[in-house]
Image (spheres, rainbow, N blue to C red):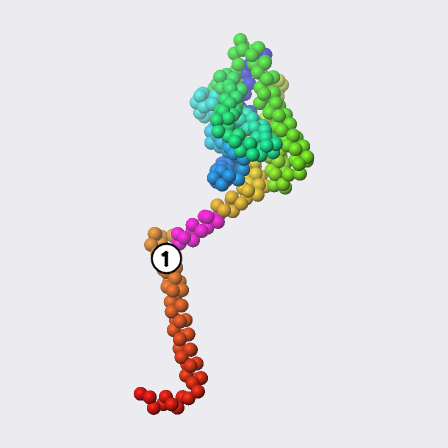
Amino acid sequence: MNSSRAVVAAAPRWWRAAGGGAAGVVLPSLLAGVGLAGLAGNLLLGALLARGARRGQAPPASRLLLLNLCAADLLLALCCLPARLAASWRGAWPLGGFLCRATEWLLHGCPVAKSLSWAAVGQAHCHHLRAPPRSRGWGGRRLAGLLAALWLAALLLPLPLFLFSRLEGAPPSRRLHCVFRSPPDAAAFMDVFGKVYPLAAYLAPSGFTWACYGRALRLQAAREPAPRARTATRLLLALSLLFQAMWLPAWVAWLWERHGPPPPPALGFLAEGLVFLNGAVSPGVLVASSEELREGLSGVWTGLRCGRRERGPAGAGAGPDPPREAAAAAEKALPDVEHFWKERRSAAAGEESDPVPWERQGEP
């Protein structure tokens, strides 16, 4: 990046244009709805994956990597989205300089972590198809080291955004905005960063992911696997492609901002909205398409319904349920009543079939 482009909006310009008017209400409301949906979806998916972990339903590596994707989406929804909403409602940055830098850093670092995680999911899935018995031992220290290296790389790659983002006032209102200003002596470094960052964060992981699933599909074509395994491969591939497609506008806006005139605010809103929307769509697609997760969701729902039935109506406390006790008492009494009437019927039948009833008439 040359010195003429030293000042760049760290955040896309849409939230500045959205301050006031209908856009200042509609756009934040849409993002808030997407964020709530993503928060609920990822919490549900995380609970189902944790429940499946106790039952051993999926390869541990793929399951933990999917949990890592949930963690990245939760970080986006909890740490980045509230700051974006506050900035869009006010039309300026309302928080401090540290939060300006941290928000921009995480807003890039979490999608990078997701990009690397999807590549790792593809590698783990391909390894499981190639050697299923050994793929279950892929966890432990090796998996912990993989996750640590993944997050370290995801947070180091966008580190210049944390170092060079700051708050500056914009005339004539002098409202503070979060901008990215690289120092003049770092122009050569930023020029290299502008080329390496998209390659390392987006292009290389995407290419590696496609190669892994291409290998997995070839293995399945040669071995004729079970329908569930083939469905899992296609589902994971589709979710990886969905993430890459929804992250692509953010890269278009990022490159446009740094190598051309300011992009239109609509592109900035679309880019950020799709990043958050992916965190809301992917868990729903995964739960709806995976038979194991649907079974887990059905089991959770059944457990909740049974729990409500056992607790009884609200306010009943921990004491016994009178209707339930009455039904139990009735069931206990029925055998006694039935035994009584059975004996009466037997006695009556015996008297009616007595061949010499007159011999008993004189008995006391």
Residue 242 in sight: no
Q: Which residues are magenta?
A: 301-313
Is 207 placed left or right of 343 in the picture? right
| Residue to which mark 1 is pinned | 321
Amino acid type, residue under disc 1 in the picture: Asp
Depth order, front residue of 229/183: 229
- The answer to whether 257 appears left or right of 141 in the picture is right
Residue at (61%, 20%) from the top-left corner?
199
Q: Residue visible at 40% across and 79% down?
A: 347
Answer whether residue 114 is magenta in the image.
Answer: no
Q: Is residue 256 visible?
A: yes
Whole-percent x and y of residue 40? Answer: 49, 38
Q: Is residue 37 above or below residue 168?
A: below
Disc 1: CA contacts within 10 A as few (<14), some (14-19) or many (>=20): some
Image-quadrant location for residue 279: top right
* Residue at the (44%, 21%) spot, across then down: 98
- Identify whether 355 is placed above or below 201: below
Q: Position of residue 324 (x, y in %)?
A: 39, 59
Where is 255 relative to 314, above or below? Answer: above
Q: Is residue 324 above or below residue 37?
A: below
Q: Quadrant of the C terminus?
A: bottom left
